[in-house]
Image: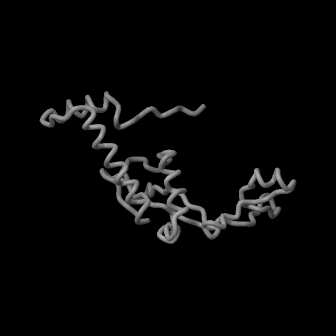
Amino acid sequence: MRIKVEYSTTKKDVYKRFKQKYPEYDIDYTTWASVIYTFNYAFRDYVLETGHKCKFIHGFGDFAITKWKPNKIVEIKGEEKVGLPIDWKRTKEYGKYIFHMNFNTDGYKFKWKWFAKAARIYTSSLWNFKPSRVSSRLLKHYLSLPDYKDKYLHWQK
């Protein structure tokens, strides 16, 4: 069974621990949470708009948008099969399998990438990064704009 992770940097108990550790900073909770959200949004927007590989603070590693061309034919148990996702809406319309070809991005797929090996976190190989829904939707929006799909690079593991 999967355990839901309930940690958020803007929870009240995290704020209370911050106040205990740094009593010299006189900052209320709403301002403190606003600073955290503003930094995270600015970092996300910078990565999306520039396409650069960027280091996150405190040794959490690098983040970037990566692109790759998926294999159109894959071999599964000795059989060659089409490796592209099925467009179910068009498949139902035409009565045969229609595949997503990603013509709007010249056949490339894009996603957020976290470079865990660059992180200075103990056992970083056990951690996983999943962008928020808003960040994924913003990536889709940027890909619909002209010239953005050429800014993103193919990053090796």
Horizontal side of residue 16 vs 120, given as left or right: left
Residue 119 x/y as whole percent: 38, 54
Residue depicted at x 81% and y 62%:
78
Q: Does residue 96 appear anywhere in the picture?
A: yes
Residue toward you, 86 or 156: 86
Residue depicted at x 31% and y 32%:
14
Residue 62 occupies quadrant:
bottom left
Horizontal side of residue 48 vs 93, given as left or right: left
Residue 25 x/y as whole percent: 15, 37
Residue toward you, 134 or 64: 134
Residue 155 x/y as whole percent: 50, 66
Q: Does residue 126 appear anywhere in the picture?
A: no
Q: Tell me: residue 139, above or below residue 1.
A: below
Which residue ends up furthest to the left in the rendered image?
24
Residue 136 x/y as whole percent: 52, 51
Q: How many marks?
A: 0
Residue toward you, 24 or 157: 24
Viewport quadrant of the N terminus: top right
Residue depicted at x 35% and y 31%:
11
Residue depicted at x 30% and y 50%:
58
Horizontal side of residue 101 vs 39, given as left or right: right
